[in-house]
Image (tube, rainbow, N blue to C red):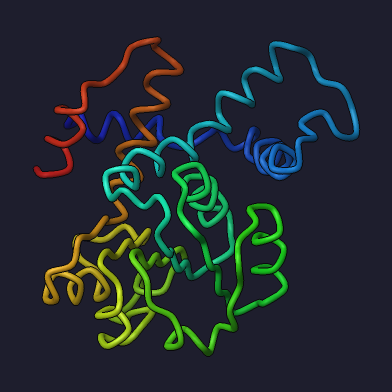
Amino acid sequence: CSPSDELMRIAEPAEEDKADIVRFLGDLSLGKVNRGKRISENRQMKYLDLLKIPFVYWNKPISKLEIKDTDVLMFGAGGVARAIAYAVNDLGGRLTITNRTEAKALELAANFDALTIPYTEPNKLSGYLLINATNIGMEKEESIVAPDIISRFDAIMDVVISEETELIREAKKQNKKYIVGITMNMYQAAEQFKIYTGRELPESFILGMLSS
C-alpha cells in the first residue's frame, strides 16, 4: 500500500480511547482535565498527547490563511467543530458559530468566547473565512450555503473528505482560497506519527501527499 495509506491507519485513536478523549477534551476547555477522578500521570499524558492532535491538525493548515483579527463563520458544533474552534481561537480569529441545534452552538461558543447566529440567518454575515464543519456534502451533491454567500468570504474550508465537494467546487469557481477535508487527515496522521515514533514528518512530504 502507499505511504499515505499507512499514515491513515494511525490517524484515528483506538476505539477504547475515544470516550475518554472526548470527555477530557471537554474538561480541557474548562481547565478541568482531572474533573471527577484522578488518573495516573502516564495515562494522563497519553490523553493529553492525543488531545493535541485535533487542535494541531487544524491549526497548521488554517494558520496559512493568516486569520488573526478576521471574522470567521463556522457551520457546525460537533467534535470536529470543537477542534477547529480551538485552532481559530489560538490563531486570533473572531469566531461566529451557527448550528441547526442552537443549544449546541451556544454551548460551544461559551467555551471560546465566540458569537452565535441562528442557522437560518447566515446571509446576514460576511467575513474572511467560512467553514463547513458538518457532514453536508458528504453523501450527495449539496453545499452548506448558496454561491452568493460564498462570494462574501475570501476563503472557504470544508471538513468533508471528498475529492471535491460542491462547496469547494464553487469556491474554486469564485477564485477563493480553500482548504479541503483531506488536509485534516494528513496533518492528523502526521501528528500521530510524531507521537508514536518521535519523528517529525517533513512539511514537503505532507504537501506532496496532498497534491498527489
The quadrant in which residue 129 appears is bottom left
Residue 30, compared with residue 108, is above or below; it is above
The C terminus: image quadrant? top left
**Residue 75 left/right relative to 6:** right
- Percent position of residue 47, x then y: 64, 26
48 vs 8, left or right, is right
Among the 4 quarters of the image, the one containing residue 158: bottom left
Which residue shows up at 49% across the image and 39% down it? 55
The residue lying toward the viewer, choosing from 129 and 50, is 129
- The residue closer to the viewer here, 125 or 101, is 125
Residue visible at 33% across and 80% down? Answer: 143
Q: Residue at x 41, y 41 (%)?
A: 59
Q: Position of residue 73 (x, y in %)?
A: 45, 68
The N terminus, quarter of image: top left
Work out whether residue 64 or residue 103 is closer to the camera in this orientation and state it.
64
Instruction: State the residue lying farthest toward the front.
Output: 69
Instruction: Choose top left, top right, bottom left or bottom right for residue 176.
Output: bottom left
169 vs 157: above or below: below
- Spot occupied by residue 184 in the image (x, y as percentages of width and height): 35, 45
Q: How many marks?
A: 0
